[in-house]
Image: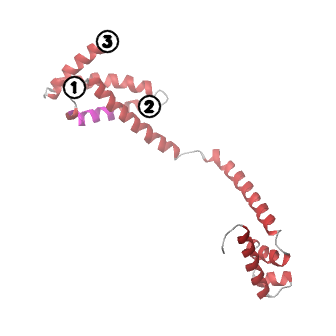
Amino acid sequence: MDLQTLETSLHATWMQALAGHAPSYEKALSAISGHLRAFLKRRLYSRPQDVEDLVQETLFAIHQKRHTYQSDQPLTAWVYAIARYKLIDHLRAHSRRESKHDDIDDWAEQLWVDNDNEARDASRDVHQLLSELPDKQRLPIEHTKLQGLSITESAQLTGQSEAAVKVNIHRGLKALAQKFGVTP
């Protein structure tokens, strides 16, 4: 059956169905479902298990939207438009679900490698910056900010008073901030 003959036959049956003739409605939906199944199988070849669900969703949408059909328009175009929208909705929902279920093994190893490299690079950069400071400022910053030692412990290690350690940390951080144009 060519497309024009199909359209004419289906349109006549659909118009009778819309007029309240129940057998015509069943016949129209049966014919439409066959065409929808073929249409969706071609587009969901990688997910054939989804075809029947999508056929049912599309038929339900056709039933709900039957009042929007304009009798001067081709019925098949209206049906396929609804099917395309349902297919797009299905693919969007499927892609969102799939993106939430990425296999952790695929990216976890790369994540740790990247984090290790980034940490190593950041540590190297910090030490490079601190090396530009005088020891009396650099050492208290390394002790307190990088190693987590207290002011008292840093004072003991550097031989400075606790007040001097605080002042030198402040001056060292201020010098680094000024180097980058940041006001502390």
Mark 3 lies on a secondary structure that is loop
Q: Nearer the viewer, mark 3 or mark 1?
A: 3
Indicate the position of residue 106 as horizontal and vertical percent values.
Answer: 64, 44
The quarter of the displayed image where residue 141 is located: bottom right
Mark 2 lies on a secondary structure that is helix
Q: Which residue is mark 3?
A: 2
The quarter of the displayed image where residue 21 is located: top left
Which kind of residue does numbered mark 1 sit on?
A: Glu
The quarter of the displayed image where residue 66 is located: top left
The disc, 1 or 2, on the residue closer to the chain's N-terminal end is 1
Instruction: Identify the image quadrant of the N terminus.
Output: top left
In reply to whether residue 135 is colored magenta, the answer given is no
Q: Which residue is mark 2?
A: 49
Seen at 42% across and 25% down, the residue is: 41
Highlighted magenta segment, given as a residue range: 56-66
Indicate the position of residue 154 as horizontal and vertical percent values.
Answer: 80, 81
Q: Which residue is mark 1?
A: 26
Seen at 82% across and 72% down, the residue is: 133
65 with respect to 47 (left or right): left
Indicate the position of residue 50 as horizontal and vertical percent values.
Answer: 42, 33
In reply to whether residue 61 is colored magenta, the answer given is yes
3 and 2 marks in contact (CB < 8 Å) = no
Q: Is residue 168 visible?
A: yes
Q: Main secondary structure of the magenta part?
A: helix
